[in-house]
């Protein structure tokens, strides 16, 4: 494995080649160079953690060329596989500064889970990609622990992944993290938006904060322009800056399942990058518009403070941030009461933020 650049001015290290499976120690592109102790230690820690997510459907052991997973055909007749991938983005920089590696790893799993759940799918297994300028076994362990805890909470297996040390791409303490999740749904239960109709209600579930979107702009406003420190308490936020920015990305799997089981939902939209403005059209059939009533909720203080400091127009806010809304369920008018009762019984707050209408014009309109 390539090591960090020697201080004595010796030859530059070779870039490490990622391993075929993250559950083996990374290799150098020169096979004659043995793995260093830190790589072996990182791999050993990963093995025990990943096994905690395994279930009876996982057929592979740690260290194979690929992960094996047996699909339950009795539970999912006429199965459709649903896949999602994502990265953490600029939030990763904050996580590294604050040492919250496990938190941001859980964000990644929850984001991918939400993306497959809105299609009606059950998450099956997760794969990750971790690349660093210099592998730190303690950081690797924290990241994998976050992935493991989130996978267990969402009922999916951490089936495998890849770990790479790439000093030519990243500084020694920098790393990149990406994830890939596969779920399954029986074809008749697939939610593709085709059941959404004129007059349906938009029932929103609150977010925890920024989730994993809008961090470049938020950091520019709060850190670069306002010169806040991450450990600084800001009255307008009601919290320290770092804590406000690092609130976890929620998993909405449980309320999504409850609404599906109650047979009260026509579709869902996960509100991520692009906000309500760009995510609602992803589920709406052609010819339908989401009419949103801005008086129905107050965006949390983080968003209003960002808008004031950054002097941002409302349109930009709703195209960049989730504005306190992390998930929108589209509910037929005659099932709205039942849907809200279903959520209330599980202590899930919901907000009716508008309706679907058939009309020409923008796919999302605000009033």
Image (cartoon, rainbow, N blue to C red):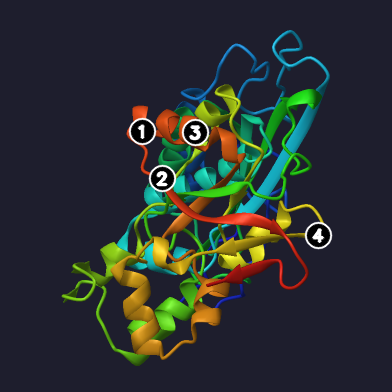
Instruction: Determine whether the residue tagged by mark 2 lies in a helix, strand or loop.
Output: loop
Instruction: Determine whether the residue tagged by mark 4 lies in a helix, strand or loop.
Output: loop
In primary-sequence order, the first of circles 2 and 1 is 1
**Which of the 4 image quadrants contains residue 22?**
top right
Please say if the residues under marks 2 and 3 sit with CB atoms less than 8 Å apart: yes
How far is disc 1 from disc 4 in space, using C-alphas? 32 Å
In the rendered structure, the answer to whether residue 298 lies left or right of residue 42 reads left
Where is residue 38? Give x, y as percent. 46, 48
Density class for disc 4 (Cα within 10 Å; few <14, some 14-19, many ≥20) is few
In primary-sequence order, the first of circles 2 and 3 is 3
How far is disc 2 from disc 4 in space, using C-alphas? 26 Å
Could you say which is closer to the camera, residue 292 or residue 111? Answer: 292
In primary-sequence order, the first of circles 2 and 4 is 4
Residue at position x 56%, y 33% in the image: 335
In primary-sequence order, the first of circles 1 and 3 is 3
Could you say which is closer to the camera, residue 111 or residue 158? Answer: 111
Residue indicated by mark 3 = 339
How far is disc 1 from disc 3 in space, using C-alphas? 9 Å
How far is disc 2 from disc 3 in space, using C-alphas? 9 Å
In the rendered structure, the answer to whether residue 47 lies left or right of residue 310 reads right
Instruction: Determine whether the residue tagged by mark 1 lies in a helix, strand or loop.
Output: helix
Where is residue 144? Give x, y as percent. 46, 41
Circle 1 or circle 4, nearest the eye: 4
Report the number of discs. Answer: 4
Residue indicated by mark 2 = 350
Residue at position x 41%, y 67% in the image: 295
How far is disc 2 from disc 1 in space, using C-alphas? 8 Å
How far is disc 3 from disc 4 in space, using C-alphas? 25 Å
Instruction: Determine whether the residue tagged by mark 3 lies in a helix, strand or loop.
Output: helix
In primary-sequence order, the first of circles 1 and 4 is 4
Please say if the residues under marks 2 and 1 sit with CB atoms less than 8 Å apart: yes
Residue indicated by mark 4 = 287
């Amino acid at each position: 494995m390539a090591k960090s650049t020697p201080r004595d001015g010796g030859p530059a290290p070779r870039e490490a080649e990622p391993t075929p499976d993250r559950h083996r120690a990374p290799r150098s592109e020169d096979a004659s160079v043995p793995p260093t102790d830190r790589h072996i230690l990182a791999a050993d820690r990963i093995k025990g953690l990943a096994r905690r997510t395994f279930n009876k459907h996982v057929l592979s052991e740690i260290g194979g060329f690929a992960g094996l997973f047996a699909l339950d055909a009795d539970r999912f007749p006429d199965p459709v596989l649903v896949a999602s991938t994502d990265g953490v983005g600029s939030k990763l920089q904050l996580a590294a500064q604050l040492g919250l590696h496990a938190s941001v790893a859980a964000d990644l799993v929850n984001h991918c889970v939400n993306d497959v759940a809105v299609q009606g799918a059950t998450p099956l297994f997760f794969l990750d990609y971790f690349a660093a300028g210099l592998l730190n076994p303690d950081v690797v362990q924290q990241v994998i622990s976050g992935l493991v805890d989130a996978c267990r909470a969402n009922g999916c297996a951490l089936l495998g992944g890849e770990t790479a040390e790439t000093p030519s791409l990243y500084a020694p303490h920098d790393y990149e993290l990406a994830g890939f999740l596969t779920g399954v749904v029986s074809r008749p239960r697939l939610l593709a938006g085709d059941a959404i109709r004129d007059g349906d209600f938009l029932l929103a579930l609150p977010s925890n904060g920024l989730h994993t979107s809008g961090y470049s702009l938020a950091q520019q406003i709060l850190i670069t322009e306002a010169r806040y420190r991450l450990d600084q308490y800001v009255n307008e936020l009601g919290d320290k800056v770092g804590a406000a920015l690092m609130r976890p990305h929620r998993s909405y799997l449980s309320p999504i399942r409850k609404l599906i089981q109650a047979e009260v939902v026509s579709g869902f939209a996960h509100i991520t990058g692009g906000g309500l403005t760009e995510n609602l059209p992803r589920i709406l059939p052609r010819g339908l518009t989401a009419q949103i009533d801005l008086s129905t909720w107050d965006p949390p203080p983080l968003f209003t403070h960002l808008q004031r400091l950054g002097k941002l127009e409302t349109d930009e806010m709703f195209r960049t941030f989730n504005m306190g809304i992390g998930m929108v369920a589209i509910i037929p008018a005659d099932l709205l009461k039942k849907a809200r009762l279903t959520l209330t019984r599980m202590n899930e707050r919901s907000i009716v933020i508008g309706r679907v209408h058939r009309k020409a014009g923008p796919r999302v309109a605000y009033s």
